[in-house]
Image (cartoon, helix red, strand yellow):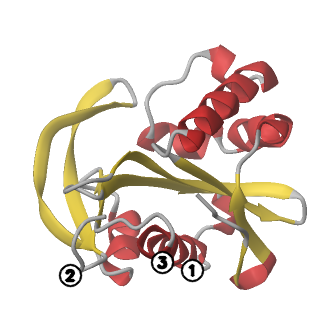
Amino acid sequence: MEIGTEELPGGVTLRLAAPSDASALCAAYVENRDSLAPWEPRRPESFFTVEAQAERLTAQMREFAEGRLVPWLLVSGGRIVGAITLTGITLGPFCSAYLGYWIAVDHQKRGLATAAVQHVCRIARDRVRLHRIEATTLPHNTGSQRVLEKCGFEPIGTAPRYLHIDGEWRDHRMFQRILHHDDPPL
């Protein structure tokens, strides 16, 4: 699948991740560790190493080659300032995927998440040929919910004890965006 590079506002580039990004991605996770902790699974210390990020990126590139995942990075001035991923890509009659993203704390509240999600939705529709994208947020993550709603996602319900986040099974609000209303599945 052809993904390419997209220029976002504020001199930020949205591009496909690569195993060679391991060191920069590790630095980004270390730098944003405290701000990401309430929104993510608890991470072992080994997650915050270049080796672990290299293994993770290599695994993601395998899944990308198989058409099951697309991992993007948000890069500004050579520094990773966020990531956005489509996972669980399923084609056929479902044509759907899950969206996840994070933005570095010093790049939040600048419209970057909204711009990135909008670009990814367009790529998902036009290049990946998806019909639908699903995203979930913790109920109190109103910032992420605003991003999703600005990008055309609609709330579709609540999933009790959906993900193990910050040490507990947590409820999540579920959102979806329909990308193709009338096109038949490929």
Q: Which mark is residue 125?
A: none
**Amino acid type indicated by mark 2:** His
* SS for dot 3: helix
Residue topped by disc 1: 111
Residue drawn at (28%, 78%) of the image = 180
Quadrant in which residue 58 is drawn: top right
Quadrant in which residue 144 is drawn: bottom left
Identify which residue, 143 or 184, lies in the foreground.
184
Residue topped by disc 3: 122
Q: Is residue 122 above or below residue 172?
A: below
**Amino acid type indicated by mark 1:** Gly
Identify which residue, 51 or 137, lies in the foreground.
51
Does 100 sit left or right of 163 as displayed? right
Q: Residue 171 at what x, y percent from top left? A: 18, 42
Contact flag, marks 1 and 3 (Cβ < 8 Å): no
Q: Which mark is residue 181?
A: 2
Which of marks 3 and 1 precedes in the sequence? 1
Residue drawn at (78%, 20%) of the image = 51
Task: For the C terminus, give its image quadrant.
Answer: bottom left
Q: CA distance from mark 1 to mark 3?
A: 17 Å
Q: Is residue 44 above or below residue 174?
A: above
Does 103 sit left or right of 150 as displayed? right
Q: Is residue 72 above or below residue 166?
A: below
Which of marks 2 and 1 precedes in the sequence? 1
Residue drawn at (19%, 57%) of the image = 93
Circle 3 Cα neighbour tier, 10 Å, few/some/many (<14 / 14–19 / ≥20): some
